[in-house]
Image (cartoon, helix red, strand yellow):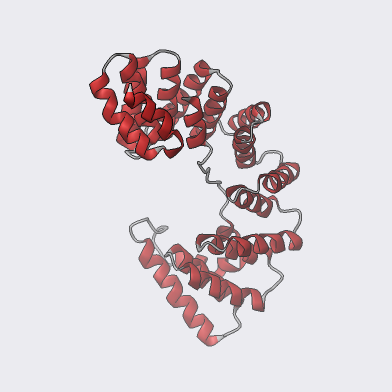
């Protein structure tokens, strides 16, 4: 049971708070000009119109001065906000051509390259940003998370270590490193990092959920329940926390609680295999075979890594 939880959880990603696209100094004159002309900052509803206006204004600036790096940078940023990542890459490339010494331009372009699946280009840009400013922790963080995402765990952990050396209060670096350490079997290091992430931001639901998941991996199911309960208090719609808590409740023989939590998790995320698996097993424990079979069949579809084990349960 816990092996299934591990396989699901190890595939998750934790989005960091750093957005390299927002750090580009060259963007500011144009973005501030647009914001200054608005009565208030743009809402999500008028985001499209806002960035379309940015594109129009920066395009006029480029027509006036075709070597205006600021205009290219700001227009690229706006294009990326509207989902035109290839357009963002093209404009950032022009900005770099005219202003090659700004590391934030490379960091910004790396984000867009990652969005279109150009992993090597993403890494190359982040490496260049680091060369231009080796004392900024954020490109190390972005490169580390990209490396971990692609399975290069050792390289990713090395970069996260550097982030923490440069900024010992970088909460997201502790969170990402803690998840990765736990995922790679270093549960002691994972717990230490995740606890530090919670100390730095006690309102981070993902940090509590991740620490609870790690506690479950070492058999501390009560601790897993407590941490996921806190995660749910902070984010009542956190499907993963309900799913993990439901699994932990099953493992502590709280079958009714497992059914309740798994049901909530599935209402929030109908594709959560762990939710069907935990609930199905809890139904079986309560001798509710008719209820268990549909859940286990659905879990078998969603969890190919557990399909054989679930198949044996269905044959009993």
The residue sitting at 67% across, 63% down in the picture is 124
The residue at the far left in this view is: 290
Foreground pick, 41 / 7: 7
Foreground pick, 242 / 303: 303
In percent of width and height, residue 119 lies at 59, 60
**Rendered-image quadrant of the C terminus:** top left
100 vs 108: above or below: below
Foreground pick, 256 / 292: 292
The residue sitting at 63% across, 51% down in the picture is 147
Left or right relative to 47: residue 146: right
In percent of width and height, residue 28 lies at 56, 66
In percent of width and height, residue 127 lies at 70, 60
Query: Is residue 76 visible in the rendered structure shown here?
Result: yes
In percent of width and height, residue 258 lies at 37, 20
The residue sitting at 55% across, 30% down in the picture is 202
Left or right relative to 112: residue 128: right
Left or right relative to 303: residue 14: right
């Amino acid at each position: 049971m816990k092996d299934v939880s591990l396989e699901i959880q190890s595939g998750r990603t934790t989005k960091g708070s750093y957005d390299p696209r927002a750090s580009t100094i060259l963007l500011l004159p144009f973005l501030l000009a647009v914001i200054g002309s608005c009565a208030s900052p743009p809402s999500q509803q008028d985001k499209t119109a806002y960035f379309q206006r940015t594109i129009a204004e920066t395009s006029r600036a480029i027509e006036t001065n075709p070597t205006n790096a600021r205009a290219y940078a700001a227009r690229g940023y706006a294009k990326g906000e509207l989902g035109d990542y290839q357009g963002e890459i093209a404009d950032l490339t022009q900005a770099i051509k005219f202003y090659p010494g700004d590391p934030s331009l490379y960091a910004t372009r790396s984000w867009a390259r990652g969005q279109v699946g150009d992993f090597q280009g993403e890494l190359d840009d982040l490496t260049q940003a680091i060369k231009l400013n080796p004392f900024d922790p954020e490109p190390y963080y972005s490169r580390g998370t990209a490396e971990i995402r692609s399975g290069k765990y050792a390289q990713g952990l090395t970069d996260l270590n550097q982030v923490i050396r440069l900024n010992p209060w970088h909460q997201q670096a502790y969170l990402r490193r803690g998840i990765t350490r736990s995922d790679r079997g270093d549960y002691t290091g994972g717990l230490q990092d995740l606890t530090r992430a919670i100390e730095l931001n006690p309102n981070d639901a993902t940090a509590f959920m991740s620490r609870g998941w790690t506690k479950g991996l070492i058999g501390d199911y009560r601790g897993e329940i407590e941490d996921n309960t806190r995660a749910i208090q902070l984010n009542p719609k956190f499907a993963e926390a309900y799913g993990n808590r439901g699994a932990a409740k099953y493992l502590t023989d709280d079958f009714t609680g497992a059914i309740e939590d798994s049901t909530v998790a599935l209402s929030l995320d109908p594709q959560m295999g762990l939710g069907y698996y935990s609930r199905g097993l809890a139904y079986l424990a309560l001798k509710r075979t008719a209820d268990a079979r549909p859940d286990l069949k659905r879990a078998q579809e969603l969890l190919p890594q557990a399909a054989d084990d679930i198949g044996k349960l269905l044959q009993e």
